[in-house]
Amino acid sequence: MGDPKRIRKKYETPSHPWIKSRIEEEKLLAKEFGTRSKKEIWKAETLLKKFKSQAKKLIALSGKQAELETKHLFRRVKELGLISGEASFDAILGLKTEAVLSRRLQSILFKKGLARTQKQARQFIVHGHVFVGNKKITSPSYLVTIKEESDVEFAVNSPMYNIDHPERASPERLAELNAAKEKALKEAAEAEAKRLEAEERAKREGLEEQQPTEEELKKVEEAAESEETEEKVEEPKGDEQ
């Protein structure tokens, strides 16, 4: 029967593993597009390198075969939505990794407002809630073509198919919810500040009530003086006895 075909990697790793600028750039890309690992970024970079290397090769060639391959290359990059205007070698050579990552199913689902975040879009796809046309796609790295972009939707038997599902809040609705949340927090903070102010006022009023007035102090002094005089008067009587 022979040995099974060797499955080759679909990406190329960086030539040097410890380049600070590249590591920082990959961190930003992973945060922006919600990739799970750097392998997904390397796959996008490898695909982009193939397009660019093919473009460089075709620039130097001429003939019918070169023209045919050029048409195929231009049609491919336009189908994937990597180039919006007229396709050219300069446009292909000027592409960046973000262009490929933005065409992933995960990014398209988030861009269409079917998910709140990139991570939530990834969760919906992996859990089998997303269909592209009549196909259920469970790979977040699936590259969506321009024709397929309008067919990206939730499965009919998925709970997410219901528009009123709480996890399917539109950006406008999310903005309203965030505004209402901020308003509620602000009102709660104001109410707490008023409560603390009322407690402080009550404490101050209680202390003022506890402090004796001038009239009370005078009465206390007069009572003390009268007691002293009575004691002085009683002392001689005791001596006479």
Image (cartoon, helix red, strand yellow):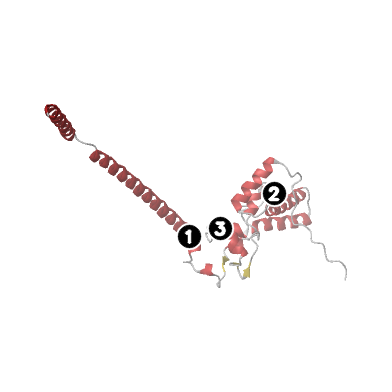
Side of 15 where 185 appears, left or right: left
User: Which residue is the site of mark 2?
Assistant: 89
Q: Residue at x 63, y 58 (%)?
A: 104
Side of 162 where 102 appears, left or right: right
User: Which residue is the site of mark 1?
Assistant: 170
Farthest-out residue, bottom = 157
Q: Position of residue 98 (x, y in %)?
A: 63, 50
Mark 3 secondary-structure assignment:
helix
Side of 137 where 212 appears, left or right: left
Does 128 appear above or below 227?
below
Residue closer to the observer: 151 or 161: 161
Tell me the crowding category of disc 3: few under 14, some 14 to 19, or many 20 or more residues within 10 angstroms, Cα based: some
Amino acid beneath label 1: Ser
Amino acid beneath label 3: Phe
Residue closer to the observer: 15 or 48: 15
Question: How far is the residue under mark 2 from the one under mark 1?
Answer: 39 Å
Query: Which mark is first along the chain, 3 or 2?
Result: 2
Mark 2 secondary-structure assignment:
helix
Q: Position of residue 179 (x, y in %)?
A: 41, 53
Closer to the observer: label 2 or label 3? Answer: 3
Q: Residue at x 18, y 34 (%)?
A: 220
User: Which residue is the site of mark 3?
Assistant: 110
Mark 1 secondary-structure assignment:
loop
Say which quarter of the image contains residue 222: top left
Question: How far is the residue under mark 2 from the one under mark 3?
Answer: 30 Å
Q: Position of residue 137 (x, y in %)?
A: 64, 66
Query: Which mark is first along the chain, 3 or 1?
Result: 3
Tell me the crowding category of disc 1: few under 14, some 14 to 19, or many 20 or more residues within 10 angstroms, Cα based: some
Residue closer to the observer: 237 or 186: 237
Amino acid beneath label 2: Phe
Q: How many marks?
A: 3
**Which numbered circle lies on residue 13?**
none
